Image (cartoon, helix red, strand yellow):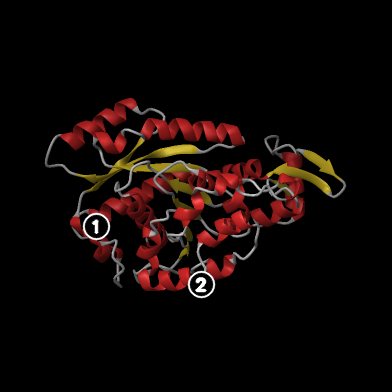
Amino acid sequence: MEDQNLIGIFEIAKLAGVGPSAVANWRKRSPDFPRPVADLKSGPVFRRGEIRAWLKRRKRQVAHIISTINLKGGVGKTTTTVALAEMLSAEFRQKVLVIDLDPQTNATVMLIGEEKWKNLNSKGLTLARLFRDALDGQQQFDLQQTLQRDVSNVRDVRSVDLLPSSLDLIDVQDNLASMPSGRYHANIPIEILRRATKSIIDDYDYVLIDCPPNLGIITLNGLRISDGYIIPAIPDILSTYGIPQIVTRVKDFAATIGEQIEPIGIVISKYDSRGSLHGNTTKRLRQQLKDAPIFDTIVPYSNKIAEAAEYVLTGTLRQKYGYTGQYDAYRALAAELKKKAEA
């Protein structure tokens, strides 16, 4: 189908894991089933986003797609993304895809190690190839070869896949606004990731997207396919200053593209209970940020969590993140995210 925003009866059936006759019955019997945007000779077509939202309300198997963003680095964004992916896999038996859009490649190195990342990068098997193809008008990106299956340095984690990042994204991202419009002006900078991953997204229970610390075009590619987003933040002035701007701009972006991208919440990370600053800031955020609720779970500051960024083979998530409350915090956070996403 030319417009990948649109979907027909057979595609809906495949997405929902049912036969076309079931989709026909839904249309007849469910008053809230989305209306077609057009009736073609081949049959009616619908907006993909509306169908996915309807299927979620019906508890059909559709991936929950969540971006992790903050305008400031060093707030635990990547560690939160990877820990949630690993917890959802090992503790909740979910199949998870991590999409690393951050040119710093930290999530990639945490999940596959630096040596394997260098090998992939030398062969062009990272997301940098995807975005460079958009600039060069080429189609060299190979989704199946780039997709890394069953990643993580923890033995208990067995259902996390990865689309790796590259430092080369630093050079690419600034040029995406001027990419060629292509035939019929169909090439749109914010659609690059969605078009490339459309065929695999709903093979997963959760898709977690680690975004760069900005709201540039690469981040917008992540938000474009997301149902919602979380904002990890250290509870101090500098780390929380840009949160209202994030919420406002994502809301405007969602309205512009005609989709819903919900602020799932703020994750308090690197919490230090030894002084009053973090406690007072957290309390103030709970009172002021009504549009982006704060997760009940708070992730403490810990050297063990910082050490978890190193790719060292280990047996369990407790060994990786720590025995003195760190593992428990991330497991509770994953449970809370799952509850919010599936509500």
Q: Is residue 126 visible?
A: yes
How far from the left and from the top, in percent, is residue 95?
Answer: 48, 61
Which of marks 2 and 1 precedes in the sequence? 2
Q: Is residue 152 left or right of residue 317?
A: right
| Element class at badge 2 | loop
Q: Nearer the viewer, residue 157 or 38?
A: 38
Q: Position of residue 147 (x, y in %)?
A: 52, 66
Q: Nearer the viewer, mark 1 or mark 2?
A: 2
Give the residue pinned by disc 1: 306
Amino acid at circle 2: Lys
Q: Amino acid at mark 1?
A: Ala
Left or right of 318, for residue 54 = right
Q: Residue at x 27, y 51 (%)?
A: 329
129 lies left or right of 340: right
Which residue is more in the foreground, 130 or 266? 130
User: What's the residue at 56%, 58% (across, down)?
Assistant: 132
Specify few, some or many for label 1: CA neighbours under 10 Å numbering under 14, 14-19, or 20 or more: few
Q: CA distance from mark 1 to mark 2?
A: 30 Å
Mark 2 sits on what residue? 123
Looking at the image, residue 12 lies above or below residue 264: below
Which residue is most to the top?
288
Rendering coords of residue 62 (x, y %): 57, 51
Horizontally, is 172 left or right of 24 in the view?
Answer: left
Q: Position of residue 237 (x, y in %)?
A: 25, 33
